[in-house]
Amino acid sequence: MLLACCKVTLMPGLHDVGSVLLPQRPLAKCLFDSMGNIDKLELVTNPCTFQLNGMTMLGISGMSLLDIMAHSSYSEPIEIMKKQLEWRHICPTAPDTLRTYPFEDADPFVLEESPNIFFAGNQSKFDTATVSQNSIAIRLMCIPSFVRTQQLALLDIETLEVFDLSLAQSDLK
């Protein structure tokens, strides 16, 4: 139903069909054939970077956040995202504890430029923050797992305000 009214960008994650090695390839379009009109469905890699209204969006599925929490004293995903920007690396534990494809010439997880929006999916709760880096305001978003929380994160692309929307049955009454 969502594809009937708007474009949907879908990024794979830890429990999706395909490789668990990062970067993950896009999900296969044939998985969505039964949905009918999939012209508005964009399948992207994990992590992914794309442009939207002149802003750079950087998205991760959250696998690197979980790995950093498992091997450090950090416990809040939004704080780890701040550190990832500071470290200029979105998978600092790879390949030691986070499985990745081997790369010889360049590390695809190094941040060459600061994004305007940095989001991580599959989180336990909604969270957001704004940080400044090189005179650029960066909106950070922890997007909760919809399956577990029935929450959506909505971003106003003009103001960078973020809202969480609950679709849980108890919240709809």
Image (cartoon, grey):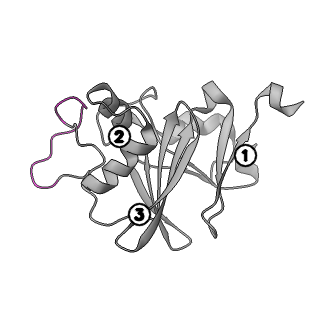
User: Local crowd at mark 1 within 10 Å, few (<14), some, or many (≥20)?
Assistant: few
**Badge number at residue 24:** 2
Residue at left offset 85%, top offset 33%: 172
**Residue 93 location in percent, x, y?**
22, 37
Of pointers 1 and 2, the one earlier in the residue sequence? 1
Label 1 belongs to which residue?
2
The residue sitting at the left extreme is: 104
Residue at left offset 65%, top offset 34%: 34
**Residue 107 location in percent, x, y?**
18, 52
Q: Amino acid at mark 1?
A: Leu
Q: Amino acid at mark 2?
A: Gln
Q: Is residue 20 visible?
A: no
Label 3's element? loop
**Residue 75 location in percent, x, y?**
39, 31
Where does the C terminus fall, quadrant-wise?
Answer: top right
Residue at left offset 37%, top offset 30%: 66
Label 3 belongs to which residue?
115
**Residue 152 location in percent, x, y?**
66, 42
Of pointers 3 and 2, the one earlier in the residue sequence? 2
Left/right placement of residue 101 relative to residue 81 reads: left
Vertical relation: 112 (above or below) 43: below
Vertical relation: 158 (above or below) 125: below
97 vs 100, nearest the viewer: 97
Q: For the magenta stretch, what is the residue range?
A: 95-106
The answer for how far apart the CA atoms under marks 3 and 1 are is 27 Å
Residue at left offset 38%, top offset 51%: 82
Where does the N terminus fall, quadrant-wise?
Answer: top right
